[in-house]
Image (cartoon, grey):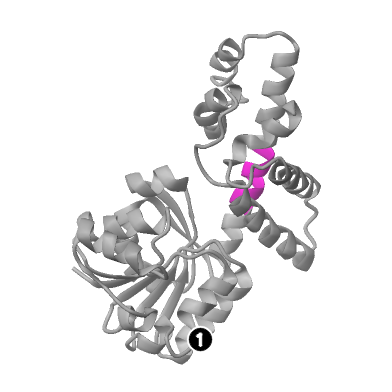
Amino acid sequence: MAKIAFIGLGVMGYPMAGHLKAKGGHDVTVYNRTATKAESWVKQHGGRSAATPADAARDADFVFTCVGNDDDLRSVTIGPDGVLAGMKAGAVLIDNTTASAEVARELYEAAKARGCDFIDAPVSGGQAGAENGVLTVMCGGDEAVFERARPVIDAYARMVGLMGPAGAGQLTKMVNQICIAGLVQGLAEGIHFGKKAGLDIEKVIEVISKGAAGSWQMENRYKTMNQGKYDFGFAVDWMRKDLDIVLSEARRNGAALPVTALVDQFYGEVQKLGGKRWDTSSLLARLEK
């Protein structure tokens, strides 16, 4: 059993922290900007809540963060009330936020300066993956530190891999989002075309999902897309945040991402349709408006 702090109890962090307590059997202290959320978590799972990130991290062996973006991440890690101010020497900071590779490298250096270690560990699998403890976790950092952290991360994951040095986890998550963006747009266009052609979409997907066109998105989203329902996963606002990180990194490294840039614009159109909180499969809605 390890002593753990978990910072950020959103739709992902809340169940992930729960798995660390229930499945991992760890001693968990939580912090959330909205204190009532932390109180609810403690009532459901046990453990303790803390008044600040630094207080939550004090004496912890592993400190997890799962917040919104780079700025949120800096606010809970750096400064007098950030986790690094409370972490003991030798403790490991594990960040599950989808953020930039730049901030991951920054926190790696900041942790090292405090005598601590850092792993960037963004996740894929959505809210359902978090609730079921079957997330895919892409890590960046030192191999020896990763090996220490992996058995703890396993509590909420089905796949955990070390991708390279600090920042490599975030870069891998960017690859993940690039692939998803193209897949969802292709699926949206396929369903749209099938409807215009007068085909039975249920029958079409039943056949093509067993061939080369098959994907997780097709298996899990085509029915709700066909029904015009978009309340089943990762929100458009968050996808645009992720794609902004991707496109910023591409400008730095020289990668050409024409499809990703186009799909990002399409998501902007979905936002204008009122779909900021719709799930990412709502690309179909802009084709059917």
- Taking 77 as reference, is 171 above or below it? above
Which quadrant does the C terminus fall into? top right
Q: Residue at x 67, y 62 (%)?
A: 245
Residue 125 seen in this snapshot: no
Magenta span: predominant SS is helix
- Taking 225 as reference, is 36 above or below it? below
Q: In the image, is 87 to the left or to the right of 271?
A: left
Q: Residue at x 50, y 63 (%)?
A: 97
- Taking 175 as reference, is 248 above or below it? below
Amino acid type assigned to the residue bearing label 1 in the image: Ala
Q: Position of residue 246 (x, y in %)?
A: 68, 58
Residue 6 quadrant? bottom left
The front one of 138 and 281 is 281
Asked which secondary structure carries label 1, the reply is helix
Q: Position of residue 221 (x, y in %)?
A: 54, 30
Which quadrant does the N terminus fall into? bottom left
- Taking 80 as reference, is 185 above or below it? above
The front one of 173 and 267 is 267
Q: Position of residue 201 (x, y in %)?
A: 61, 14
Residue 16 seen in this snapshot: yes
Q: Residue at x 52, y 33 (%)?
A: 216
The residue range painted magenta reads: 175-183
Q: Residue at x 33, y 65 (%)?
A: 36
Q: Is residue 197 magenta?
A: no
**Residue wearing tag 1:** 110
Crowdedness near tag 1: few (<14), some (14–19) or many (≥20) residues, C-alpha within 10 Å: some
Q: In the image, is 128 to the left or to the right of 102?
A: left
The front one of 103 and 83 is 83
Q: Position of residue 83 (x, y in %)?
A: 40, 81
